Image: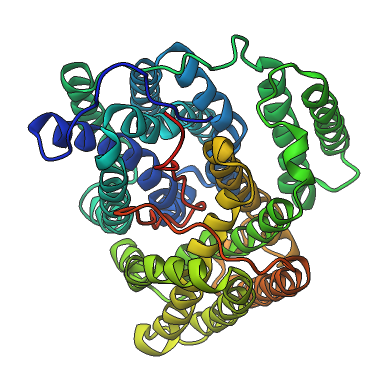
């Protein structure tokens, strides 16, 4: 998914009206996907009550979207490089918007889950395209500032998403969190057609790794089905056994196909780099812990503590604010001293913050039950996220910076997907227990201790595995870090080869 600007023309200046419209189109497009990934969690109790759904069904509402997004993200970037970044970006926006309408009118939980999976396909097409367009459209001296503007505005959109979702749930219904995507999608398509230049990578592989993408979807779908349905149907249920085995076989086949493909989505050789592999394992663990707890927390706040959907959405605002303020500073520190200290201390602090959130199960007061854990968690993420992302980018040669970022982002989403699938089972939350406050509170306390322990294990891995303490490359001038909570920042190297 390397983003390489076209070799003709000097590019657009950020200070011009054309430059501002390009940033607006890409921010609104990627913002739809990032907001949707977080705002649905606030609506889960409402969705569950309307459809009389089991907790496994609510898991699928979240997992279906993450599954297709994670499996097809690299393919979306590859298609944009080869067929035209604006074309694929607009296709993704249209796809996402149509799927949002289908989600809004879904008459059953099964159809809602299916449409959420289609939403994930659209997000996989538009997400990498938004940054690739910035990289290709702007002149070299403005690329860093353009990406910085995208990152900062993306962080604001992430913070506003739960507020918007909570408000829509309060005044209308959960269906409006999907309907709101329609006018935004129409605006993005219009802006893209009028203001965004087309670009492609003349050196992009001529063949798209479709077999790898299909096997990725099958592997994740089979394994997720087994992990989500196993606690309810029983681990010996034929459908659970068959799906799990099929998923594992697809994963094995995926590795074999990628090794033999002339143009693999993910060249297996990149994982031979120790720093890159260790960083991605730490990413997987940390974002699994984070994704699993943040999946359960909005449900707990509403069912156990009596929060309104809007109150549950507001609860995590300090976390995003802390990340916005602290991530860039943490990145600059890692550029001076190396990533090992922060990637060791950060996960420890994250784990402490997650465990502290367990107080929300016994203390419904925000200032005493929720806010302390949110603040500590935000500090831990601010310490960790920028060094983690910069280490992933810096571990591979400069020409692979886009690929390194995309893989790291994808690994984070995979971690969240697996956690949403398996953490509730470990915590004993299944069936309709999420509607019973005492059972949900007890399960949540188990979940946060498991998640915290995973983060502490990630800290040990960083301390032992990152023996090379050399500083990581500092971010380009003006570049900051998108503070989305569902995955690590998807950043495009502002100094990639022209």
**Front residue of this view, candidates 19 and 228:** 19
User: Relative to residue 497, is residue 390 depicted above or below?
Assistant: below
Residue at left offset 43%, top offset 86%: 372
Q: Position of residue 123 (x, y in %)?
A: 44, 32
User: Relative to residue 368, is residue 33 depicted above or below?
Assistant: above
Q: Quadrant of the C terminus?
A: top left
Tell me: 407 left or right of 154.
Answer: right
Q: What is the total number of numbered labels drawn onto the structure image?
A: 0
Q: Position of residue 462 (x, y in %)?
A: 70, 69
**Front residue of this view, candidates 102 and 334:** 334
Q: Is residue 64 visible?
A: no
Tell me: 336 left or right of 419.
Answer: left
List the single residue furthest toward the left.
17
Q: Position of residue 303 (x, y in %)?
A: 46, 68
Residue at left offset 59%, top offset 68%: 339
Coloring scheme of the render? rainbow
Q: Position of residue 150 (x, y in %)?
A: 29, 45
Residue at left offset 55%, top offset 46%: 409
Report which quarter residue 197 is drawn in.
Answer: top left
Tell me: 444 left or right of 24.
Answer: right
List the single residue furthest toward the bottom.
368
User: Relative to residue 217, is residue 262 depicted above or below?
Assistant: above
Tell me: 136 left or right of 354.
Answer: left
Q: Is residue 407 visible?
A: yes
**Front residue of this view, candidates 497 and 41:** 497
């Amino acid at each position: 998914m390397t983003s390489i600007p076209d070799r003709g023309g000097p590019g657009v200046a950020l200070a011009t009206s054309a430059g501002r419209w390009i940033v607006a189109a890409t921010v609104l497009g990627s913002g739809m996907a990032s907001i949707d990934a977080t705002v649905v969690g606030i609506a889960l109790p409402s969705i569950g009550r309307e459809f009389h759904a089991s907790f496994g069904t609510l898991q699928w509402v979240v997992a279906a979207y993450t599954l297709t997004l994670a499996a097809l993200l690299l393919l979306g970037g590859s298609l944009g490089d080869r067929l035209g970044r604006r074309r694929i970006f607009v296709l993704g926006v249209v796809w996402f918007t149509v799927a949002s309408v289908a989600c809004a009118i879904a008459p059953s939980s099964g159809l809602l889950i299916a449409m959420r999976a289609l939403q994930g396909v659209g997000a996989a097409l538009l997400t990498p395209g938004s940054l690739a367009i910035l990289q290709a459209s702007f002149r070299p001296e403005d690329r860093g500032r353009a990406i910085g503007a995208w990152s900062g505005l993306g962080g604001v959109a992430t913070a506003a998403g739960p507020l918007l979702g909570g408000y829509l749930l309060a005044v209308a219904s959960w269906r409006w969190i999907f309907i709101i995507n329609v006018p935004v999608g129409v605006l993005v398509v219009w802006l893209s057609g009028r203001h965004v230049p087309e670009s492609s990578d003349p050196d992009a592989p001529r063949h798209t790794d479709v077999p790898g993408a299909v096997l990725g979807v099958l592997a994740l779908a089979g394994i997720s089905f087994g992990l989500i349905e196993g606690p309810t149907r029983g681990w010996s249920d034929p459908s659970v056994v068959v799906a799990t085995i099929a998923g594992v076989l697809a994963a094995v086949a995926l590795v074999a196909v990628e090794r033999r493909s002339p143009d693999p989505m993910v060249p297996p050789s990149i994982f031979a780099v120790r720093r890159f592999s260790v960083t991605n394992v730490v990413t997987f663990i940390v974002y699994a812990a984070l994704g699993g707890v943040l999946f359960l927390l909005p449900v707990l706040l509403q069912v156990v503590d009596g929060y309104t959907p809007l109150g549950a959405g507001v609860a995590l605002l300090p976390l995003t604010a802390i990340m916005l303020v602290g991530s860039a500073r943490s990145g600059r520190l890692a550029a001076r001293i190396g990533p090992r200290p922060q990637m060791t201390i950060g996960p420890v602090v994250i784990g402490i913050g997650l465990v502290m959130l367990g107080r929300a199960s016994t203390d419904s007061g925000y200032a005493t039950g929720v806010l302390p854990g949110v603040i500590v968690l935000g500090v831990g993420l601010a310490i960790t996220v920028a060094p983690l992302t910069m280490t992933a980018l810096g571990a591979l040669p400069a020409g692979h910076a886009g690929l390194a970022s995309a893989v790291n982002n994808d690994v984070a989403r995979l971690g969240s997907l697996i956690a949403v699938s398996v953490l509730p089972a470990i915590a004993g939350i299944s069936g309709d227990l999420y509607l019973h406050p005492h059972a949900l509170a007890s399960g949540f306390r188990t979940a946060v201790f498991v998640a915290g322990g995973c983060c502490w294990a990630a800290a040990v891995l960083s301390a032992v595995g990152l023996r090379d303490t050399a500083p990581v490359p500092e971010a380009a001038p003006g570049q900051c870090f998108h503070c989305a909570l569902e995955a690590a920042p998807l950043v495009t190297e502002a100094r990639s080869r022209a």
